[in-house]
Image (cartoon, helix red, strand yellow):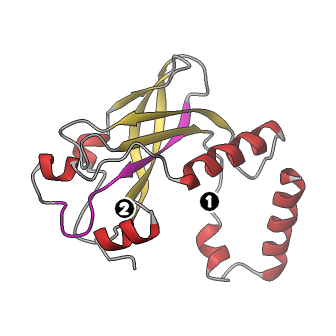
């Protein structure tokens, strides 16, 4: 059961905006604004029972500092976060929750983005780079995973909210499905 965490900002602007992230390819990017943040804030019992982790995801617009790539892009950061009701515990206590085992959805996301990039899908962002890090002592789960994906910044808006809530007209949803299917296959 997912527990609301409206009172916790996992990706604080003071810490993330202006931060630079380097990728193994040699490129360096500066985070300039946060697009959105979402979390899956789970209880310890649920994490242990279902083999899952509490996780926060932040999506940021970034600008290239050095290396290859366009002037602007998007970085998604997936961060292991503490179990429900443990976010305010000491770092040593939170570190006991750390895992370097990446969620299976991480591999699926990278594989899907790689495949769609190779297929030159115009309705999904191209994957430029990705990396896996370990959180430091000053982060939410010291020793836990921190995964970053550098992607193309697409023009327009994210249709997912309209698509999921069925506010997008059916004809438009069908066109989007067909374009995605053509790129995927």
Where is the N terminus found, in terms of image quarters? bottom left
Residue 76 among magenta residues: yes
> Mark 2 or mark 1: which is in front?
2
Q: Is residue 9 left or right of residue 99?
A: left
Q: Is residue 154 left or right of residue 30?
A: right
Separation (CA) of disc 2 from disc 1: 28 Å
Looking at the image, which residue sits at the far left?
A: 90
Q: Residue at x 33, y 77 (%)?
A: 3
Asked if labels 1 and 2 touch by Cβ distance under 8 angstroms, the answer is no
Badge 2 element: loop
Per the rendered image, the range of residues in magenta is 72-87
Residue 51, percent across and down? 45, 63
Q: Residue at x 37, y 66 (%)?
A: 48
Residue 109 among magenta residues: no
Q: Where on the picture, by quarter, is residue 29?
A: top left
Which residue is label 2 attached to? 54
Badge 1 element: loop
Which residue is label 1 attached to? 157
Closer to the chain start, of discs 2 and 1, is 2
Graded by Cα atoms within 10 Å as few (under 14), some (14 to 19) or many (20 or more), the crowding at tag 2 reads many
Residue 162, percent across and down? 63, 75
Depth order, front residue of 141/128: 141
Q: Residue at x 19, y 52 (%)?
A: 94
Residue 59, percent across and down? 46, 50
């Amino acid at each position: 059961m997912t527990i609301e965490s409206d009172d916790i900002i996992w990706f604080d602007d003071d810490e993330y905006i202006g931060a630079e992230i380097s990728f193994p390819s040699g490129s360096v990017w500066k985070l300039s604004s946060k697009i959105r943040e979402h979390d899956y804030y789970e209880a310890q019992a649920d994490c242990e029972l279902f083999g899952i982790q509490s996780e926060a995801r932040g999506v940021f617009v970034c600008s290239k500092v050095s290396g290859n790539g366009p002037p602007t892009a998007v970085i998604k950061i997936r961060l292991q976060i503490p179990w429900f009701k443990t976010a305010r515990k000491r770092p040593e206590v939170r570190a006991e929750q750390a895992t370097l085992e990446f969620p299976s959805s991480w591999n699926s996301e990278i594989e899907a983005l790689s495949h769609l990039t190779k297929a030159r899908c115009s309705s999904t962002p191209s994957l430029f780079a990705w990396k896996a890090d370990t959180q430091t002592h000053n982060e939410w789960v010291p020793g836990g995973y921190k995964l970053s994906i550098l992607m193309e910044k697409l023009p327009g808006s994210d249709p997912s909210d309209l698509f999921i809530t069925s506010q997008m007209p059916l004809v438009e949803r069908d066109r989007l499905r067909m374009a995605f299917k053509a790129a995927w296959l």
